[in-house]
Structures are given as structure tokens and as C-alpha cells.
Image (cartoon, grey):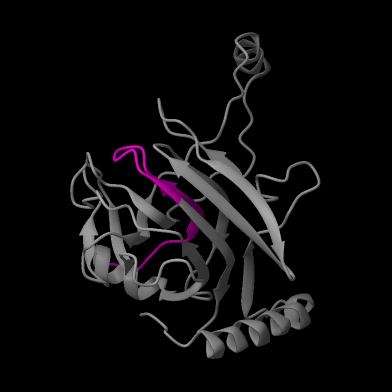
Amino acid sequence: MKMRTPTLLICIIASGFLLASANSSRGNATTKFIGFKQGKKSNKVPEGWEIIPYFRTAKNKLSLSKEGKRTILRVKSIGSASGVLKRLEIDVKKFPVLVWRWKINRAVGMAIETRKDRNDAAARIRVIFGKAAPKTLKRPPEILKFFKSFGIRPEGKEPRGFKIDYIWGNNLPEDDVIDYPGSKNHKMVVVEKGNKRANRWIWEKRNLIEDFQKSFRSSPPALIGIVVLTDTDQTNEGVIAHYSSIIMMGK
């Protein structure tokens, strides 16, 4: 389910967020703001998010900026790939609608989403469903000391579970649902494609319950994570993506 009426959607989000703020104390909020907020410790990683690196792959360059009251995550990817993860525990029956906006400067022209060795995308929003793990993963002090001795900072991993990637693809038809190459219980939904709508902010709206049922033929468990990801490590191309205003909404 997509929405092509940005002005109307902005009004819906604004009114929903105000309702959430007003009603949160009564426990009946109608929206959940997921990200982003600029933390005091870093101007690169949003507060409450963590970097997700990939083995033997260069990381993307991240930066945060302000656009009015919104915080924007800018991702520069040149033959690289890494994500930022927000760990969650949300009942999608209460908050089935995911809204976000994104912008890219160009699609990954050599990407072939169905091939494992060419499965790059200028922008992805990955949603992960399953059983929530502890939000703080404690490592034994001896393990941390070992990493530190080699100048290595341990970083996070994606939670295990059912995954759906909403992608800004290259040339597959919009709304196609395809398998993520080489992975089990992982689907991709083509939300945007190509360069026709590049270089401008695009609002997106998806019903997670409908997409999960279409992808896995069952009802979804809890939403336990959202990953924002741009990857160009397989095609060695270069893109810049911007993300903001990730919100969960009631029906």
C-alpha cells in the first residue's frame, strides 16, 4: 500500500504525532516516533540507534543534520555497506502502519536485486519480526578487554527473525515482492525504482500486517527492529541517501 499525496500524509503524521504526545500519559497513543534524534555524544549516529557493520565490508559514511524540527540521517555509500539499527518491541496489531520519508541522488544502476552478487540498493528500510532480545547485550569483561587490546570496538548484529526490506530499487516493478537472495525468511518489496523520483523527498506508507501476510502467509509476530541501510558494496557504485521521519501509526 503506497501513498502519493505528500501534503495529506504530512497532515496525518502531524496530527497523529500531536495525539500521541497528548495521549501518551493515558497509555492510548496512536503513533510512535522511531527516529531520528541527534544525541549529545555523536553527530553521526542517531540517539538510541546502533551501527550494524558487515563482515569484510567498508562502512558507509554517516552524518546528521537538522531540517526545521526534523533530524536527517545522511548516508554516503561508495562501494560500502552498513546500517543503523533501532531495537524495538512493538505489537503491530496496535501499530500496523509504517511511515517514513527518504531521498536518493541516484539509483544503483548495476544492481540486480534477484542476484546475490548484485543485490545492492540506494535505500532500504528493513523491518524485523520475531522474539525480542534484551535491548542491552552485555559482553563479558574479558571479551571486551580482548577486543580493546587489538583496537577493535565490538558492534551490534541484526536480531534474528522474519525480515522485509522496503527498497529503492533499480528496475524491478514497484510493489514486486521477491526473495532476498541466499536468505531464508527474508523478502524484499520494491517501493521505488530508478531515477525518476530521485533528488526529492518521497513519503512512503506501508501496512506491515498486509505485507507480512503477503510475504509469509501468516500473521506477524512483534516488530523487534528497524534497520536503515544503503549498500553499494557489490556494484562498487556511489550513492547518497537521506532518511527521516520514521513513524509507527495505528490504523
Quick check: is 249 in the magenta stretch?
Answer: no
Highlighted magenta segment, given as a residue range: 218-239
Q: Which corner quadrant of the image does residue 65 belong to?
A: bottom right
Q: In this orientation, does residue 134 appear?
A: no
The relative height of residue 140 versus residue 9 in the rendered view (above or below) is above
How far across and how far down the image is residue 163, in percent? 36, 54
In the rendered view of the protein, which quadrant contains the N terminus?
Answer: bottom left
Comparing 139 with 169, the one in front is 169
- Which residue sits at x=54%, y=44%? 133
Comparing 209 with 1, the one in front is 1
Comparing 155 with 167, the one in front is 167
Q: Which corner quadrant of the image does residue 136 belong to?
A: top right
Q: Please give left or right for residue 227 compared with residue 210 in the image.
A: right
- Which residue sits at x=66%, y=13%? 145
- Which residue sits at x=51%, y=46%? 76
How far across and how far down the image is residue 119, in percent? 27, 47
How far across and how far down the image is residue 200, in percent? 49, 71
Q: In this orientation, does residue 171 appear?
A: yes
Q: Please give left or right for residue 176 compared with residue 17 in the image.
A: left
How far across and how far down the image is residue 49, in percent? 62, 48
